[in-house]
Amino acid sequence: MKRHFVFASTVILALAASGLLMAQSDPFVGTWKLNLAKSQYDPAPPPKSQTRTWESSGKVSVEGVDAAGNPMKYGYTIKSDGKDYPKTRASLNGADTIATKRIAPKTVEATFERNSKQVETTRFAISKDGKLLTITAKGTNPSGQCSNNVIAWDTQEKKPLRNQTQPLALTLRDAILRHLGEGSEVTEQFRKLKHNDQEALIDFLRSL
């Protein structure tokens, strides 16, 4: 049992390093579509449409059409270390850096700055069912106006590591067997396990 636990720990570290486990467990990861009917923008007008992509690495990309009908695109990095990270291109708040921290499994708080001055505080929160992302943002825009936005995003179909008809065990099995590079040694150790031991290990990973 102790040997299996040690090996399971190695597998977890290898999969986490590749982002495979994180992609399955992080509720923020995926594609989100702006729900204008559930959102409140002050000041108005809101953008016409937006799609938000949140990667397991923490990279967030937003694309859409602004209030004037022009294409728009920006992005930033969400980390939990509280350090400043640069934004890419302009957004409504005009910030050039973002610092974030995760205060709960489904809640992230962020501080946006422009020219080293705070311009917005934001909270990202996932609903209990994982289907709705609500972004509450308060601050000032580049024109000096106070802004208070509550923006709702609906989750889109996520792309799992497996076919939807396959059980989770195959998801983890495939993730282990296909893991190369730094995890090739883990893959080889897993292949050498007896089938029952492989199943026991997968069951353990599923319980986490």
Image: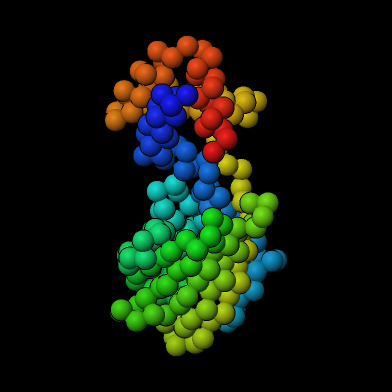
Is residue 68 in view from this perspective?
no
Residue at left 65%, top 69%? 39
Is 82 left or right of 108, judged from the image as shown?
Answer: left
Residue toward you, 40 or 65 = 40
Marks counted in the figure total 0
Q: Quadrant of the C terminus?
A: top right
Residue in view at x 56 percent, y 50 percent: 27
Decide: is 120 above or below 32.
Answer: below
Rendered residue at 44%/86% (across/down) = 143
Q: Nearer the viewer, residue 90 or 207?
A: 207
Asked which quadrant contains residue 43, the reply is bottom right
* Quadrant assignment, res 160: top right
Q: Residue at x 44, y 56 (%)?
A: 60
Image quadrant where residue 83 sits: bottom left
Vertical placement of 84 versus 21: above or below? below
Horizontal and vertical percent for residue 78? 41, 59
**Residue 67 image offset from top left, x and y in percent:** 55, 71
Foreground pick, 148 / 81: 81
- In the displayed orientation, state which residue is furthest to the front: 2
50 and 70: which is toward the camera: 50
Left or right, 147 with reference to 144: right
Q: Is residue 193 visible?
A: yes
- Position of residue 172 measured from the top left corner of the image (x, y, whole percent): 51, 28
- x, y percentage for residue 164? 63, 29
Q: How is the image coloured?
A: rainbow
Left or right: residue 198 versus residue 114 is right
When the figure is inspected, residue 72 is found, relative to residue 184, above or below; the finding is below
